[in-house]
Image (cartoon, rainbow, N blue to C red):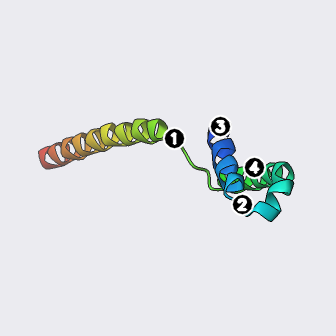
Amino acid sequence: MLDPKIIDDISSKVTANLPKGLQSLQSDLQYNLRSTLGAALNKLNLVTREEFDIQQSVLARTRAKVEALEERVKELSTQF
C-alpha cells in the first residue's frame, strides 16, 4: 500500500506549479487530484521496495529448494 504522504506531496507539487489564474482553485484541484491519483495508483497494485525485496529473497530460497529437490529426484530415479 502506498503511503498517503507520497500522494499528498505529488498533488501539492502539481498544484503549486499551476498558472496564476488557476491557483484560486488550488484547494479544490488539489483535493480532486489527490483522490484521482490515489485511485489510479491503488489500481496498479504497487508494492514498496521493502516488500519487493522480501518477496525476491523468498523466491530465491524457493528456487534453491526446488533445484535441490530436482537433484534428489534424479538421484532416486537412477537408483531404481
**N-terminal-most mark, 1 or 2:** 2
Q: Nearer the viewer, residue 21 or 60?
A: 21
Q: Amino acid at mark 1?
A: Thr
Q: Specify whether 19 is left or right of 54.
A: right
**In this view, 59 is above or below 37:** above
Circle 1 is placed at which residue position?
A: 48
**N-terminal-most mark, 3 or 1:** 3
Q: Amino acid at mark 4?
A: Arg
Q: Report how far apart the C-alphas of labels 2 and 3 lie in the structure.
A: 20 Å
Q: Specify whether 48 is left or right of 21.
A: left
Q: Amino acid at mark 2?
A: Leu
Residue 72 point in image, percent of width and height:
20, 41
Badge 1 element: loop
Badge 4 element: helix
Of badges 4 and 2, the one in the foreground is 2
Instruction: Kindly identify the residue that appears in the image at 62 percent across and 42 percent down.
Output: 6
